[in-house]
């Protein structure tokens, strides 16, 4: 046995199957989200030229590309070959390094990166996988380095919350229902990150959280 849990095996099969089918079309509905990608990169703060940056669950590379253009030396990882194939066509001339990898077992040493990000991917994971991914991100980030997470949150207001979360639930996986009741800042704090700032996205239906790895 490789030590993986049943929920992790189920998650891998579900997500790989889903994104294998979606990869050729994934970017089409995201044409209007460029502003959100820029907002997330803005929250990361100034990126020193050549700063090693890790983008976990990079998908088709949209966030990785934005961070690379800000001066980072970005490595994007994903465990779906079809998504990485799309990303490679997009970032081929931009210098982003792409690697097929499982985020619960990142193939990097401790403290390699000055910034680690994961964007709109944690809600696709069962709780045990999500915790492992965040802890791996913390492990490969240097002490004092930044971590940046963006994903869904329950928006304020009962009616608004019911409307937005109900709509999102239609097209997201079953893991979203559990995720939406959790707090990203608390997840980061448990993993050894001091949260510095939160910024709402998508009219309050999502949030970006930036923190610093404790030394």
Image: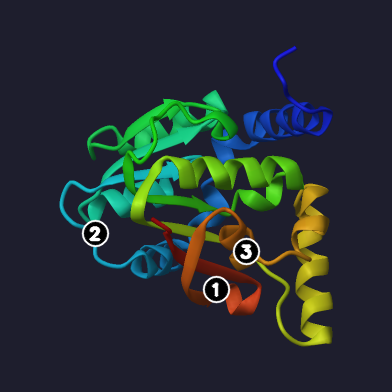
Residue 63 placed where, x, y %? 41, 51
Residue 15 placed where, x, y %? 70, 34
Asked if residue 57 can be seen in this view, the reply is no
Residue topped by disc 1 = 201
| Residue at 55% across, 73% down | 201
Residue topped by disc 2 = 47
Which of the two labelled residues, at mark 2 and mark 1, occupies the earlier sequence position? 2
| Residue at 57% across, 40% down | 25
Give whichever of 167, 136 is nearer the camera: 136
| Location of residue 101 with respect to 76 vertically, above or below | above
For the residues labelled 1 and 3, the Cα–Cα distance comes to: 14 Å
Quadrant of residue 200 within the rendered picture: bottom right
Q: Is residue 63 left or right of residue 193?
A: left
Pointer 2 local density, CA inside 10 Å: few below 14, some 14–19, many at least 20? many
Quadrant of residue 177 within the rendered picture: bottom right
Pointer 1 local density, CA inside 10 Å: few below 14, some 14–19, many at least 20? some
Residue topped by disc 3 = 184
| Residue at 72% across, 21% down | 3
Question: What is the secondary structure assignment of the residue under circle 3?
Answer: helix
Question: What is the secondary structure assignment of the residue under circle 1?
Answer: strand
Mark 2 and mark 3 in contact? Answer it, CB < 8 Å.
no
For the residues labelled 2 and 1, the Cα–Cα distance comes to: 21 Å
């Amino acid at each position: 046995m490789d030590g993986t849990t049943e929920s992790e095996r189920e998650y891998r099969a579900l997500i790989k199957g889903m994104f294998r089918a979606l990869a050729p079309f994934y970017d089409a509905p995201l044409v209007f989200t460029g502003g959100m990608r820029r907002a997330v990169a803005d929250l990361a703060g100034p990126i020193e030229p050549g700063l090693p940056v890790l983008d976990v669950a990079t998908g088709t590379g949209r966030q990785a590309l934005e961070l690379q253009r800000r001066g980072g030396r970005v490595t994007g990882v994903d465990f779906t070959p079809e998504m990485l194939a799309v990303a490679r066509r997009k970032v081929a001339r931009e210098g982003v390094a792409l690697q097929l990898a499982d985020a619960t077992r990142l193939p990097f040493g401790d403290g390699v990166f000055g910034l680690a990000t994961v964007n709109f991917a944690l809600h696709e994971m069962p709780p045990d996988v999500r915790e492992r991914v965040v802890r791996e991100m913390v492990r490969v980030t240097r002490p004092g380095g930044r971590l940046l997470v963006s994903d869904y949150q329950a928006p304020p207001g009962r009616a608004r919350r019911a409307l937005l979360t109900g709509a999102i639930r239609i097209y997201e996986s079953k893991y979203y229902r559990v995720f939406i009741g959790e707090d990203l800042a608390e997840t980061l704090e448990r993993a050894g990150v001091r949260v510095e700032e939160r910024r709402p996205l998508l009219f309050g239906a999502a949030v970006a959280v930036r923190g610093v790895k404790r030394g």
